[in-house]
Each structure stands twice: as structure tokens, then as C-alpha cells.
Image (cartoon, grey):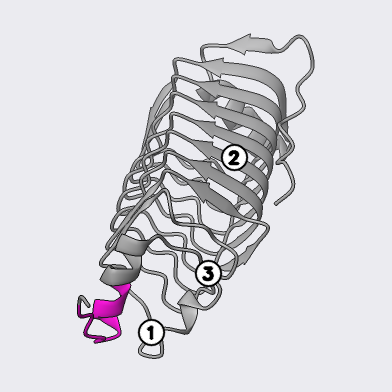
Amino acid sequence: MAAVKPPKLPPVLTPVADFEPILIRAIDEQQDIQEMHIKNVRLYNTDFGRTGFKNVIFENCKFETCDLSDCSFIDVIFKNSDLSNSRLNHSYFKYCSFLCVKAMGSLFSQSIFTQVTFSDCNFQYGNLDSSTLNSVFARTCDFSHSALSQCRLKDTAVKECRFIETGFFKTRLKGLDFSDSELAAIQLSDTFEELEGACVNTWQAVELARLLKIIIKDI
């Protein structure tokens, strides 16, 4: 796949420590939040009101059980932040980076990811069902027990990630190289059509053979 383009940010961003009043005003005025460095913010059970974010850094933020559904994020960095158990369904991400982000149990279903990088992130028990991933790169991330069913993948790559009991039902994995990742007990359809064209190592092939009820004998 081609290199994923990083977010483009202006040299100077407005520092923000008290974010909630800015969010409320943006929702009321139906305006995007732009060119801000939002740091050390804690919000619980907050509705983000379908707000758009452009040229923004979220650093060391915790948005717990918040509703970010239908929000858009363009040229945005999430860094050392926690989105666990929050809802980001139907959201749009373009030219974004997730760096050391915790998103356990978060919902990203039916979202669009274009030119997005995930690095050292925890998406255990997350839900990305029916999402589109176009030019996405995930490195050293944990997708164990997550749902990635009926996703559309294009120019997407993974490296040294964990996929333990991950659901790939009806998601075509053609072109994905899992050989340096952990891949075990994944959930597939009865036809195993998802695996066509995927690249795995020898040990993973043995594990997948068990799913296919193939008996392997040493010669």
C-alpha cells in the first residue's frame, strides 16, 4: 500500500484546557472546531452534537461513555487519550492519527476511515462493523474480541497487531498480511471466503486449518 499521509496542522494551535464551553458554543452555532490543541480534558457522558473538527490535536484527553456519533475529524491527532465505551458510529475520519489511544468497547460502526494511522492503540471489544477503511495502517494495536464484520478494506495494512477472537464475518481480507501479527480463533462465515488472498505464516495456517477441519499429518 502507498504511504498514509499524516495530518496537516498549522505551526501554531490555540491551547485549550477548558474544552466544554467551546464544544457547547460550537454545537449551538453549528460551527466546526478548528486549529486547537485540546489537552488534559476529562468529559463523561457528553454529547458532541455531530460537530466537525479540523486541524485539532486531542492530547491526554479522556472521553468516557461520550457520544461522538456523526462527527467528522479532518487532519486530527488523538494522542495518549482514552475513548473507552464511547460511541463514534457514522463518523468520518480523514488524515487522522491515533497514537497510544485506548478505545476499549468503543463503537465505530458504519464509519469511514481514509488516510488514517493507528499506532499502539487498544481496540479490544470495539465495534467497527460495516465501516470503510481506505488507506489505513495499524501498527502494534490490539483488536482482540473486536467486531470488524462486513467492512470494506482498500489499501489497508497491519503490522504486529493482535487479532484474538476477532470477528471478520463477511469482511474480505484479500491483500492483508497477518504474518507478523497474532491471529487466533477468528470468527468467519461458514464458507471462509473472508480468507481468500490473505497472507499468513505457517503457524497461523495450521490454526486456520483447524477451522476448515483439515487434518494435518507430519511426514
Question: Pointers 1 and 2 in contact (CB under 8 A)?
Answer: no
Point out residue 65 in the picture as x, y percentages from the top left corner. 35, 42
Which of pointers 1 and 3 lies earlier in the amino acid sequence? 3
Point out residue 129 in the picture as x, y percentages from the top left corner. 47, 66
Position of residue 71 relative to residue 62, above or below, is below
User: Would you name the residue on which mark 2 appears?
Assistant: 117
Residue beneath the point at 55% across and 61% down = 176
Span of residues in magenta: 208-217
User: Would you name the residue on which mark 1 appears?
Assistant: 189
- Is the C terminus in the top left, top right, bottom left or bottom right quadrant? bottom left
Identify residue type, mark 1. Answer: Ser
Identify residue type, mark 3. Answer: Leu
Residue 215: within the magenta?
yes
Question: Pointers 1 and 3 in contact (CB under 8 A)?
Answer: no
Identify residue type, mark 2. Answer: Thr
Q: Which of marks 1 and 3 is in front?
A: 3
Q: Distance between the residues labelled 1 and 3?
A: 13 Å
Give the side of residue 179 with respect to residue 131, left or right: left
Residue at disc 2, secondary structure: strand
Residue beneath the point at 43% across and 55% down = 179
User: Would you name the residue on which mark 3 appears?
Assistant: 173
Does the magenta stretch mainly form a helix, a strand or a loop? loop
Point out residue 143 in the picture as x, y percentages from the top left corner. 37, 51
Judge the density around disc 1: few (<14), some (14-19), many (≥20) Cα neighbours within 10 Å: some
Q: Nearer the viewer, mark 2 or mark 3?
A: 3
Q: Distance between the residues labelled 1 and 2?
A: 28 Å
